[in-house]
Image (cartoon, helix red, strand yellow):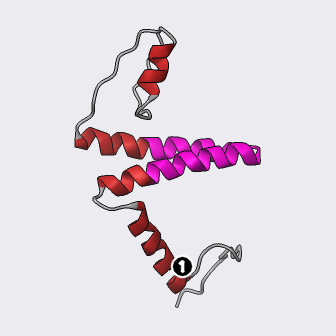
Amino acid sequence: MPTYNKLVRDKIPEVIEKTGKRFSTSVLNNEEYIVELRKKAFEELNEYVETETKEDAVEELADLLEIVHALAEYHGSSIDEVEEVRKMKAAKRGGFKEKIFLIEVEDE
């Protein structure tokens, strides 16, 4: 039986159960949850980086967004609040649409 030891979406146990396979799970405490959620963020980001098609990229971006939602909630926030902060930062410092690549800055 393969061992996964990773955070999964809430309905994954139901999906596995429908296949008739045996499995085991546990519910994480808050300290374990944030550690695993952060690991999952890196896992999903890496999966995005490795995509080769638009469809796969969008799929992985959706997974990343789900992680951002969960992280915001964990920190007592919401995706709406995160979006507002994003907008304020974009207004103040810009976004990434102009594709600017900083090479160097003179050190005084």
- Give the residue furthest to the bottom: 108
For label 1, the crowd category at 10 Å Cα-Cα, with few meaning under 14, some 14 to 19 and many 20 or more, is few
Q: Residue at x 45, y 54 (%)?
A: 68
- The location of residue 100, given as percent across then percent down, is 69, 76
- Give the residue furthest to the right: 53
Q: Residue at x 61, y 41 (%)?
A: 47
- The location of residue 88, given as percent across then percent down, is 47, 80
Quadrant assignment, res 60: top right
Drawn side of residue 26 relative to residue 18, left or right: left
The kind of residue on which mark 1 rests is Ala
Residue 4 can be seen, yes or no: no
* Location of residue 25 with respect to 91 vertically, above or below: above
* Location of residue 31 with respect to 25 vertically, above or below: below
Drawn side of residue 9 relative to residue 50, left or right: left
* Location of residue 55 with respect to 71 vertically, above or below: above
Residue designated by label 1: 90
Residue 85 can be seen, yes or no: yes
Confirm whether the magenta stretch covers residue 67: yes
- The location of residue 11, given as percent across then percent down, is 44, 30
Front-most of 85 and 42? Answer: 85
Region rendered in magenta: 40-68
Front-most of 81 and 49? Answer: 81
Q: Residue at x 57, y 48 (%)?
A: 62
Number of numbered tags placed on the structure image: 1
- The location of residue 106, given as percent across then percent down, is 59, 87
User: Which secondary structure, mark 1?
Assistant: helix
Q: Residue at x 52, y 12 (%)?
A: 19
Front-most of 47 and 85? Answer: 85
Characterize the magenta stretch by its predominant secondary structure: helix
Confirm whether the magenta stretch covers residue 42: yes
